[in-house]
Image (cartoon, helix red, strand yellow):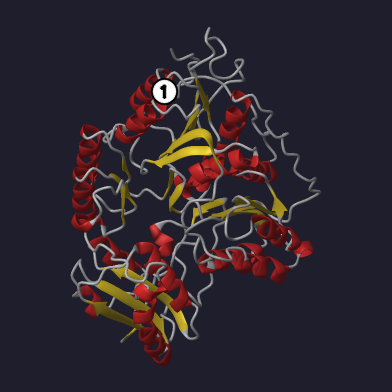
């Protein structure tokens, strides 16, 4: 153990110790590591816990969080570091719990007591159709290529994979008629099987493709609420629509869904790509023979130009609708399939707000991006959270993605452990400059069992009459294990205003703090440059 080093700004370190224990040649899935870290963080006397592979990016994150010691610096990339900060007694107790937390379930706990579990891709059943890869980034490409060469689709959860390796993986998948989802692919649903962070969705006729994980979750949950179901949901990884990668997985996924007789409509969700990539994707979508709704978030667009996809085609098939928000994507899908979208949301009247600044505290990166397009001058980063130190909020609007690496070093993702976000919420509610707060709550597989408890506690601590309006939205379905109705009820009981979508929450919050703008509810067909089109 070592004394916790001071912060880079010279702020004195809390009176605690920092410990690294290294498990040689040990590997565990990243989600399992995050859950173990969440458990350890909750132990008395533990202020921070992080379990990571000793790759260079992870070592940098531990160092930035003041969680790296000499023992950790000496670790190799194939080693697992258990980093702890707390009292000496608490650290010893936490270390003793680590083996049980990382232990694989015993064979006797399986429904098939004598079932054999493969330990390498070469040992899998030849009929295996997909490999989910969650290794440290430097090893992910090799494992993905092994899977593809054995005839498996590759779902690459791993991040920190060099872009040239991503291109190699995706070119290999294309040659073999397979899909390479990722790297850094956070969600997917293939043939009804959820992958990564995913909601429980009813089966149906819609195929979704996305370079935006929580964006896909939001749109698919809105469609579920509208009575529609998902045929496939294919994540591509966040870089797929970059100039370098050139939409390789997106184009392959479009071809796959175009050939699928059970898919009647295709949805694509992404931040706006480079114009040449966008044109290529829209042209391919227009040749699919099916209606396609494209959500390029933040796309500038004029007033509505008419009916939705396919209206001017003699056979009623095909056509591309481009929208700029997640809400408008779901509405366009419902209308294209002959349904009636939900009525526009009417937020409650607010007589006065106490401060000047918006505090949007997101767990989902896509939601933060969507809000930033409405408030481009907002601050998008603050100092990483340090237990025991007050969080300093800027005297400007603030839109944070608290799932970013800068805030998760030493902590699980806020969808799993809300501790860091609860601390930022406490700071926002205590700041007299706060005019409104926005929160997202994401449910489903991979998310924590009670994602709203810590947030509701902070809301109750301040009291509704003494605080700025808190606007929340829930991304979930009735099938999710966390009970979406109970989560919504708990937020409302704590005094939050529930918006139906991320878009509505952001638009209303921005209108409160700026006094400008009405929610945009149009959906039109155009290229990302603003030119209206009907794709052939």
For the point 50% across and 35% down, the residue is: 297
Badge count:
1
The one of 303 and 113 positioned closer to us in this rendering: 113
Whether residue 7 appears in this view of the structure is no
159 sits left or right of 403 in the view: left
Q: Residue 113: give x, y in percent of width and height.
A: 36, 71
Can see residue 333? yes
The answer to whether 226 appears left or right of 125 in the picture is right
For the residue pair 170 and 375, the one nearer the viewer reads as: 170
Q: Is residue 453 left or right of residue 211?
A: right
Compared to residue 355, the image places residue 340 above or below, namely: above
Q: Position of residue 531 (x, y in %)?
A: 48, 16
Secondary structure, mark 1, is: helix
What x and y, as percent, mark residue 423?
56, 68
Query: Which image quadrant: the N terminus?
Result: bottom left
Q: Residue at x 18, y 75 (%)?
A: 74
* Displayed quadrant of residue 330: top right
Name the residue furthest bottom.
Answer: 89
Residue 11 vs residue 466, the one in the foreground: 466
Q: Mark 1 packing: few (<14 Cα in 10 Å), some, or many (20+)? A: many
Place of residue 397 in the rendered image (x, y in percent of width and height, measured from the top left): 57, 50
Q: In the rendered image of this protein, does residue 238 appear above or below residue 384?
A: above
Q: Quadrant of residue 209?
A: top left
The residue beneath circle 1 is 285
Q: What residue is at 32 percent from the left and 35 percent from the top?
A: 249
Q: Is 523 rendered above or below residue 33? A: above
Q: Quadrant of the C terminus?
A: top left
Residue at the outermost top position: 314
Instruction: Tell me what residue is drawn at x 40 percent, y 17 percent.
Output: 287
């Amino acid at each position: 153990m070592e004394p916790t080093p001071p912060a880079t700004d010279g702020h004195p370190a809390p009176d605690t110790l920092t410990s690294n224990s290294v498990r040689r040649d040990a590997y565990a899935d990243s989600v399992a590591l995050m859950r173990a870290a969440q458990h350890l963080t909750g132990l008395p006397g533990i202020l921070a816990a992080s379990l990571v592979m000793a790759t260079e990016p992870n070592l940098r994150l531990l160092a930035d969080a003041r969680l790296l010691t000499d023992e950790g610096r000496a670790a190799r990339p194939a080693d697992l570091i258990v980093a702890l900060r707390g009292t000496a007694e608490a650290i010893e107790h936490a270390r003793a719990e680590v083996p049980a937390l990382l232990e694989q379930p015993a064979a006797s706990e399986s429904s098939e007591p004598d079932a054999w579990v493969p330990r390498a891709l070469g040992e899998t059943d030849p009929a295996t159709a997909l490999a989910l890869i969650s290794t440290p980034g430097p090893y992910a490409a090799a494992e993905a290529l092994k899977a593809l060469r054995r005839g498996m689709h590759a779902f690459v959860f791993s991040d920190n994979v060099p872009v040239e390796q991503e291109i190699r993986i995706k070119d290999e998948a294309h040659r073999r008629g397979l899909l390479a989802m990722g790297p850094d692919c956070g969600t997917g649903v293939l043939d009804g099987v959820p992958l990564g962070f995913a909601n429980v969705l009813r089966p149906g006729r819609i195929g979704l493709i996305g370079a935006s994980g929580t964006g896909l979750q939001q749109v698919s949950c809105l469609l579920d609420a509208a009575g529609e179901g998902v045929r496939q949901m294919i994540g591509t990884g966040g870089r797929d629509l970059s100039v370098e990668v050139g939409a390789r997985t997106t184009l392959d996924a479009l071809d796959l869904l175009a050939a699928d007789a059970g898919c009647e409509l295709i949805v694509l969700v992404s931040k706006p790509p480079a114009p040449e990539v966008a044109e290529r994707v829209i042209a391919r979508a227009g040749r699919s023979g099916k209606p396609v709704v494209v959500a390029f978030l933040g796309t500038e667009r004029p007033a509505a130009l008419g009916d939705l996809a396919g209206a001017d085609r003699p056979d009623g098939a095909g056509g591309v609708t481009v929208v700029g928000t997640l809400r408008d994507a779901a509405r366009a899908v419902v209308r294209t399939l002959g349904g009636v979208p939900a009525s526009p949301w009417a937020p409650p009247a607010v007589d006065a707000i106490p401060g000047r600044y918006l505090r949007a505290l997101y767990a989902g990166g896509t939601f933060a991006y969507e809000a930033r397009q409405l408030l481009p001058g907002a601050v998008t980063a603050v100092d990483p959270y340090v237990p025991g130190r007050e969080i300093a909020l800027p005297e400007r609007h603030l839109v944070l993605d608290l799932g970013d690496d800068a805030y998760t070093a030493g902590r699980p993702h806020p969808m799993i452990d809300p501790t860091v976000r609860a601390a930022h919420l406490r700071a926002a509610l205590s700041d007299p400059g706060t005019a409104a707060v926005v929160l997202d709550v994401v449910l489903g597989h991979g998310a924590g069992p009670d994602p709203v408890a810590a947030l509701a506690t902070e809301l109750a601590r301040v009291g509704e009459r003494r605080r700025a309006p808190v606007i929340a939205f829930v991304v979930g379905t009735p099938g999710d294990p966390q009970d979406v109705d109970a989560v919504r009820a708990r937020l409302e009981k704590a005094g939050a205003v529930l918006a139906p979508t991320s878009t509505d929450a952001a638009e209303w919050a921005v209108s409160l703090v700026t006094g400008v703008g009405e929610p945009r509810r149009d959906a039109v067909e155009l290229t990302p440059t603003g030119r209206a089109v009907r794709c052939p």
